[in-house]
Image (cartoon, helix red, strand yellow):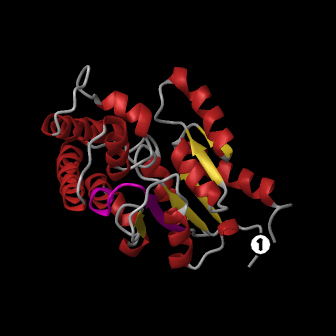
Amino acid sequence: MDGNTITTLLFDCDNTLVLSEELAFEGCAEVANALCRDKEVALAADLTGPALMSEFVGQNFRGMLASLQARHGFSLTAAEADALVRREEDVVIAKLRAALKPCEGADAALERIAAARRPYTRAVVSSSALRRVRASLETVGQDRFFAPEHVFSAASSLDPPSSKPDPAVYLHALATLDRRAGECVAVEDSRSGTLSAARAGIPVLGYVGPYPEGQKQEMARRLTESGAVVIMGHWDELEEKLAEIERLSRPLRG
């Protein structure tokens, strides 16, 4: 095999393949506010989806629980944390089932690469719980593009569970797929996801499509600083950007 050839595409899910983050953090805020009331945490105002998304985008709810405990000085038993994670999954999945949409152009791009003369191995690598990722893919019909065993979750596929920016989930995906980092490309929209893939040695295609126009330039800068080698604004650019990554990587691979 040519060492310069990309064989495998590793896609983040939330706000990369599907527009899930606003819905998910709305549900996350509901569960987090109920927890704070239960633990008698005095908040100046209720936590909101947008505020949580701005701080924790790219991470999972278990990681957020750890941050909330450290910040507000309360503790959870392992059983309490597990129950809250399950509750948050249920709330978020219900919202996704009701209103989830794919990212603009994602379906068409997946159709093109699935039908390409040079097929890619395709996988999803997410921080979110496996139940949630599968529900997202099924809701928008993208599950047809990914073998069930090629959907990886930092929250569910690892023991112990992890979250991006830890590279563990990407390293697990590489080992399971029997791929070298240099023959893969990860598509990521967040700083934590980009760091996760880059720390695993995987070239990253940073995707800024879901961000408001006024934020895209800043997000492109942040993703580049976090390790993205190329930035993509719309899924229509996928093949062009993959070719660019191959050109840029030639001196480094082989």
Q: Nearer the viewer, residue 86 or 150?
A: 86
Where is 239 relative to 154, above or below? Answer: above
In this rendering, position of residue 40 left or right of residue 71? left
Q: Nearer the viewer, residue 134 or 79?
A: 79
Amino acid type, residue under disc 1 in the picture: Gly
**Region of the chain picked out in magenta, as a range:** 121-133
Q: Residue 124, position in %: x, y?
A: 45, 61
Q: Residue 130, position in %: x, y?
A: 32, 63
Where is 88 relative to 179, above or below? Answer: above
Where is 55 relative to 76, above or below? Answer: above
Which of the 4 image quarters holds residue 100?
A: top left
Q: Residue 116, position in %: x, y?
A: 57, 65
Mark 1, Cα crowd under 10 Å, few <14 / some 14-19 / many 20+, is: some
In this rendering, position of residue 183 left or right of residue 120? right
Q: Quadrant location of the N terminus?
A: bottom right
Q: Quadrant location of the C terminus?
A: bottom right
In this rendering, position of residue 140 left or right of residue 124? left
